Amino acid sequence: MSEVAPVGLIAAFMEISRVTLRQLLGRRRTLLLILLSALPVLLAVAFRAAGETEVERFTRRIFDTITMTILMPLVAILFGSGAFGAEIDDGTVVYLLAKPVPRWIVIAAKAITALAMAILLTGSSTVLAGIIDMAPAGSDGVSATMAQLLAVVVGSACYVSLFLAVSLFTRRALVLGIGYMLVWEGALSFMLPGIANLSIRQYALGASTAVYKLPLQEVRLSAETALLLAGVLVVSALVLATWKLMRFELPGGSD
Amino acid sequence: MTDPKRAAGVPATAPATAIAAATAPAGSIYDLGYRHYNGKRNGRGYAMWSLFVESFRGVWGLGRPMTAKAAPFILAGLYALPAVVQLAFSSVFAQRIAAGDQLQLLNYHNYFADFYFLAFLFCVAQAPELVCRDQRYHVLPLYFTRAMGRMTYAVARLGSLALSLFILLAAPALALFVGDVLMQSDAFKAVGDELPKALPSIPATALVAAGLASLSLAISSFSPRRAYSAIGIVAYILLMEAIPAALYSIGQTGGGSWTDKLFVFTPVTSLIGATYWFFGQPLDPQDFAGSLTSGTYLVASIGSIVVATAVLVYRYRRVPA
Amino acid sequence: MTAQVDPEVNGLQVRSEVAPAIELVHAARWYGNVVAVNDVSFSLGAGVTGLLGPNGAGKTTLLHMLAGFLAPSAGSVHILGRSPHRDPSVYRQIGLVPEREAVYPFLTGRDYVKFNARLQGLRDPDGAARAAIARVGLEDSMDRQIGTYSKGMRQRVKVAGSLVHDPQVLLLDEPFNGMDPRQRIAMMDLLGVLADEGRTILFSSHILEEVERVGTEILVVVAGRLAASGDFRAIRALMTDRPHNISIRSSDDRRLATTLMADPAVFAVELTPAGLCVQTAQLGAFRRLIAGASRAAGVRLLEVTPADESLESVFDYLVRR
């Protein structure tokens, strides 16, 4: 009578994942996120029409300034902090907590679902935009697209797990996430190049060099270091989240 | 709710007398002393003022727990920090200026350009806080059935956010002013010298406050969820900055020279450009690509304020209460 | 946890069983400087118990401690002999109906109950869900989205979700909120049936009739402390400093009244068209007196009922003390 049987764990995982999916995808907001993800693609079409099909220009103008600095962080922060945030705000988290399911399963189901959705949106946008604009560049274009996809996947994993953990500590995880993205990644990393070791953007761009060296000057980490640091971040964030969920205390309510 | 005038309008003695027929088995109605309000009614203007004050307190978390104060005060503090640091070291600078060094780290006209992201973050954090929950918990009808109309509600909320932003943006300008005055040996003369340089800060700050407040509140009013409003504000502003830049870069090589006109749609760049107009400063070509002048950016900013306010008011006319 | 288990800590023994389903020993919980639950001890076995108290008395905190969502700041909490905090496997034996109305609005009633069944690791989630839905009488609307449910239906689907794994202990926070009178009665009857099956059921309420109808066992919490526990009639009997009201119908009320007034145990007698209303300090003494007095007066007693044995009067008394 200790824990749920192994078969039950998979069912529990699927069930939590299903509910999370429904929570993150409202009708109107999904449409908005799809529009947001479509932007790099539309710009890629415009670039292609203007005859700009170099890997370097695309990487700088669209992938770096839009996908990596706006689209990927926004979507990942939204899904990461929303996976629990909505449940905590609404009070439905009780239904998850009052179950004999090991807490790491709950965290894993939430994180993997949020990450899958983030990658589905931004990853497909990256691949589409990359192919549209860089296909004429030949095999370089294809490798660059793959490298960009890898960067998006690594970046999303970091953002999702970090802000999923943060959302268990504060209700303002989303605003903290946007603050991190604007202040830390935006302003401070230009002023202080030394924080490369503590920047999700650097992890993501560093990881991409494993596939292809994207023409961006400020890639400061090697693929190995970047992947290692990203892995440490993801694992420790998820462990922290599990630890916190085990001690999660519900607010007293109106009583 | 704790208005003494209202309390004064209540009859002091309202006896809860029960007029009950002791023997008749028939039903009866008891006067439990329901108190009619006979006091003065202050009307719509007063309601708007009350909501304005209450919203302002809400933006800064005044009268609320510390957790509500954290975000606004930390962000305002961070925004003012560089100016305060400069103020703290003004005596050091004063000596060097006396020695003839031209030393200008931070200035009235480019302070916002350097640190705008903190003011922007303030909007992302506090604008959804101000309006989303009213829709989420369906309390809008409680507002709209009072003396407060839909329009009044929108204007009061907007005004409080704009005033909050004005305070946040004006604080470092004030610190710079104090610092600049202290730097000089003759304080009276220094005030005379500095004031003309500092005064354009007031209209410039008012414009930026109105611009950021109207835009962020207009976007927030469309979602009952704070998370989605916040994301909406960030997405709109960042994308409207990035898209014209991307298209402009196509235009440069592709021959479409008109593409620099697209910069009028940038929310933050336009506001920064407009502030330069008040200071009479030339636009730094490093920050402002294209050929637009600060006057154009001023017009663009005012246009953006008008459109955003119209959208906000339109939204509150239509929103199901 | 080797604390001495003392079932009579609060002066009243509730039920004696080998292993109490719910047991609190000197449990306390505070948030910062606010004490929500203060030194509460009781133990419960099978049956329905009402947790009573005015709003803000600490009922939800107490239930959250029982459900393992809050660690006691002092003392201990045990469910079926185990500490529920940080031990998810306890939830196999606990069904919880939280106070907040929120249920995933996008799920159908059936899907929600199945969700609970799967997370409980049940082998036949469909069958279990169907049975639980049948128990709360929601078969007709189980395929509708919960977002379209009325408040009462939401409460019922929450109860179904908490019942699906056949728990030994059922904790319900304000389960009758939002239900119409008929649904209340159905839910009360359901709780009675569930208790007869050997379950331990604890539900909180601030509405007295609810508690009175479901069970006579109550726990009264006032300002975080346990003010009384046990059968509410027994509690009433202990309240000796307050006169008991008893209404009597007899063949000759006037004659009986004169006889009763002669006895020192009787404070006052009121003659009403409906019968006599007698006030006495000692219920036991009065019971012995009444039979003899009526016989002596040659009056036939038709009905003797305690007029204020309602829970409300008991509760009122305890809260004001």
Image (cartoon, rainbow, N blue to C red):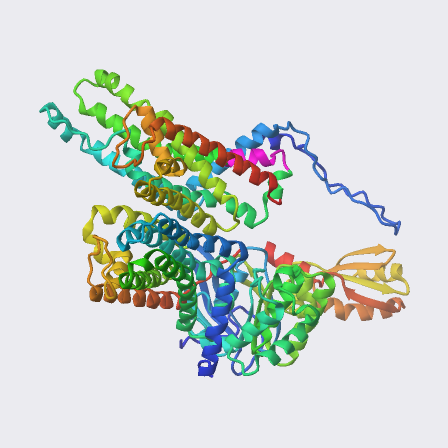
The image shows residue B234 at horizontal and vertical percentages of: 40, 47
The image shows residue B213 at horizontal and vertical percentages of: 44, 37
Residue reaching furthest to the left: B99
Classify residue C57 by image quadrant.
bottom right
Q: Which residues are magenta?
A: B146-157
- Residue in the picture at 67% in, 62% down: C152
For the N terminus of chain B, the image quarter is top right
Q: Is residue A220 visible?
A: yes
Residue C21 is covered by the magenta coloring: no
Placement of B153 over or under C35, stated as above or below: above
- Residue in the picture at 55% in, 36% down: B313
- Residue in the picture at 60% in, 34% down: B148
Q: What secondary structure is the stretch in magenta mostly built from?
A: helix
Quick one: B68 or C213, which is closer to the camera?
B68
Quick one: B154 or C284, which is closer to the camera?
B154
Taking the image as shown, residue B147 lies to the left or right of residue B258, namely: right
For the C terminus of chain B, the image quarter is top right
